Image: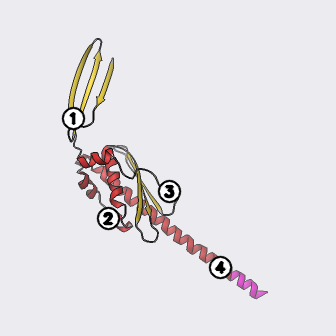
Amino acid sequence: MNSLLNIAKPTLLNTVKVQATRIIGSSTINASTNFLRSYHENVIKHYENPQNVGSLPKDDPNVGTGIVGAPACGDVMKLQILVDEETGQIKDVKFKTYGCGSAIASSSFASQKIKGLKVWEAKEIKNQDIAKELSLPPVKLHCSMLAEDAIKMAVKDWETKRANKKKGKKSKKSKKAKKAKTVNVDAAQN
């Protein structure tokens, strides 16, 4: 028994036409069904043409990485920010998402929304902002929550790297100062 499934592009907003052809022996049964989807045009726009897809070098001290997942549905989202060290402005954003159309759209929209913001402003983005802009249905709100969590984790990762970098500079300065004192003490003793 052979089965063929052809899925056409949406012909009407929020409608996907699925045509199934099932071959049984020498006779053919054609069935055409329209499945209504609750996807808003903004979700479709970001899903079909996602913005800022890619990766940044995770070892760069000015890059923060947030990786989150939803065990219930299997969506996984990685969002990275490149922050100007002096101004705290997000210069670039990249993401990779494995998941449904709403998860990809949430990642794409969030990456556009935070690009150019100061880090503290990006931390203020809430999942409700993302869900409202994309008109996500209640069953897809977890996608906007993933995007919010990914932003917060990326910022936290960047802040940790920044603190460690500052701590490292202080540590190097104190080692140099101790070494200089040791040299001065040795010189004074001779």
Task: Write down the residue under mark 1.
Answer: 35
| Quadrant (top left, top right, bottom left, bottom right) of the N terminus | top left
**Which element is circle 2 on?**
loop
Residue 78 is inside the magenta segment: no
Q: Of the residues shown, which amino acid type is indicated by label 4?
A: Lys
- Crowding at mark 1 (Cα within 10 Å: few <14, some 14-19, many 20+): few
Where is residue 185 drawn, in percent x and y? 72, 85
Q: Earlier in the sequence, mark 3 or mark 4?
A: 3
Query: Start and end of the magenta stretch?
Result: 181-190
Which image quadrant is residue 127 in?
bottom left
Nearest-to-viewer mark from 3 and 4? 3
Task: Write down the residue under mark 4.
Answer: 178
**Which element is circle 3 on?**
loop
Q: Earlier in the sequence, mark 2 or mark 4?
A: 2
Q: Earlier in the sequence, mark 2 or mark 3?
A: 3
Residue 178 higher or lower than 69, as above or below: below
Task: Write down the residue under mark 2.
Answer: 124
Q: Earlier in the sequence, mark 2 or mark 1?
A: 1
Nearest-to-viewer mark from 2 and 4? 2
Where is residue 147 drawn, in percent x and y? 34, 54
Residue 58: which numbered mark, if any? 3
Q: Of the residues shown, which amino acid type is indicated by label 2?
A: Glu
Q: Earlier in the sequence, mark 1 or mark 3?
A: 1
Residue 188 is inside the magenta segment: yes
Spatial CA span between label 1 and label 3: 41 Å
Spatial CA span between label 1 and label 4: 73 Å
- Crowding at mark 2 (Cα within 10 Å: few <14, some 14-19, many 20+): few
Depth check: give the residue in front, 190 or 117.
Answer: 117
Spatial CA span between label 2 and label 1: 37 Å
